[in-house]
Image (tube, grey):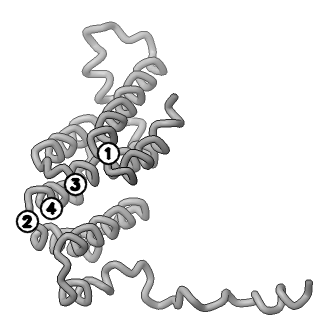
């Protein structure tokens, strides 16, 4: 069942069923917690809550948890639930020991302060050395905020931030392509 959550979340999100995305994400996070507890060494019921935090912090956040978190945050933005997004921020800080500032910016966006959120996401992309999946999530959130604003001036201002690598031409053929194509 663990493998099916993310595809079901994607289908629910594209069909504008945002509450279902949040439900599925909560179930996925619970299942991951249960799996980590089951893999732990003979944990007594009293020690479960303390050991869960240690197990999650030691295991680190994998891409599945991050993808689930980003889908949930995007759905909660669409629902306008900034307090729930801050609850997810607190949860990740408590269990994983990581502070995701992009989640805070998402809460700003959900509460209608889109310009503030966009500036915060822009600072995150320029300032910190973020993993690739977090950078991609920040870019998606910037695009989401720009779609909400519908302001061409803002779009042109954020264009360099959105583009992943401005030095490469996405339409250009890779080097050596013609040689391989003509040899066949």
Residue under numbered circle 4: 109
Marks 4 and 2 close (CB-CB < 8 Å):
yes
The residue furthest front is 15
Residue under numbered circle 1: 17
Frontmost of labels 3 and 4 is: 3
Q: Toward the viewer: 131 or 2?
A: 2
Q: Is residue 36 found left or right of 182 in the rendered image?
A: left
Q: Secondary structure at mark 2?
A: loop
For the C terminus, the quadrant is bottom right
Say whether disc 1 or disc 3 marks the residue closer to the N-terminus.
Answer: 1
Q: Is residue 57 visible?
A: no
Say whether disc 4 or disc 1 marks the residue closer to the N-terminus.
Answer: 1
Q: Toward the viewer: 141 or 43?
A: 141
Tell me if mark 4 has few (under 14), some (14-19) or many (20+) residues whose alpha carbon lies within 10 angstroms of its own: many
Q: Which mark, residue 113?
A: 2
On screen, 65 above or below 173? above
Total numbered circles = 4
Residue at point 45%, 37% (across, down): 5
Tell me if mark 1 has few (under 14), some (14-19) or many (20+) residues whose alpha carbon lies within 10 angstroms of its own: some
Say whether disc 2 or disc 3 marks the residue closer to the N-terminus.
Answer: 3
Marks 2 and 3 close (CB-CB < 8 Å):
no
User: How far apart are the two marked residues, 4 and 1, measured between alpha carbons?
Assistant: 19 Å
Percent x, y for residue 60? 39, 42
On screen, 12 above or below 141? above
Say whether disc 3 or disc 4 marks the residue closer to the N-terminus.
Answer: 3
On screen, 13 above or below 114? above
User: How far apart are the two marked residues, 3 and 4, measured between alpha carbons?
Assistant: 9 Å
């Amino acid at each position: 069942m663990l493998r099916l959550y993310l595809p079901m979340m994607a289908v629910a999100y594209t069909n504008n069923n945002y509450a279902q995305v949040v439900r599925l994400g909560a179930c996925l996070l619970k299942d991951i917690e249960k799996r980590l507890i089951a893999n732990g060494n003979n944990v007594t019921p009293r020690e479960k809550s303390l050991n869960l935090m240690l197990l999650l912090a030691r295991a680190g956040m994998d891409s599945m948890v991050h993808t689930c978190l980003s889908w949930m945050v995007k759905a909660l933005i669409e629902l306008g639930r900034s307090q729930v997004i801050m609850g997810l921020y607190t949860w990740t800080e408590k269990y994983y020991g990581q502070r995701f500032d992009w989640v805070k910016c998402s809460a700003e966006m959900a509460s209608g302060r889109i310009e503030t959120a966009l500036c915060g996401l822009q600072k995150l992309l320029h300032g910190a050395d973020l993993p690739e999946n977090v950078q991609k999530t920040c870019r998606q959130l910037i695009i989401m905020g720009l779609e909400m604003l519908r302001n061409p001036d803002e779009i042109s201002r954020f264009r360099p931030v959105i583009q992943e690598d401005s030095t490469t031409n996405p339409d250009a053929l890779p080097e050596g392509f013609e040689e391989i194509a003509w040899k066949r």
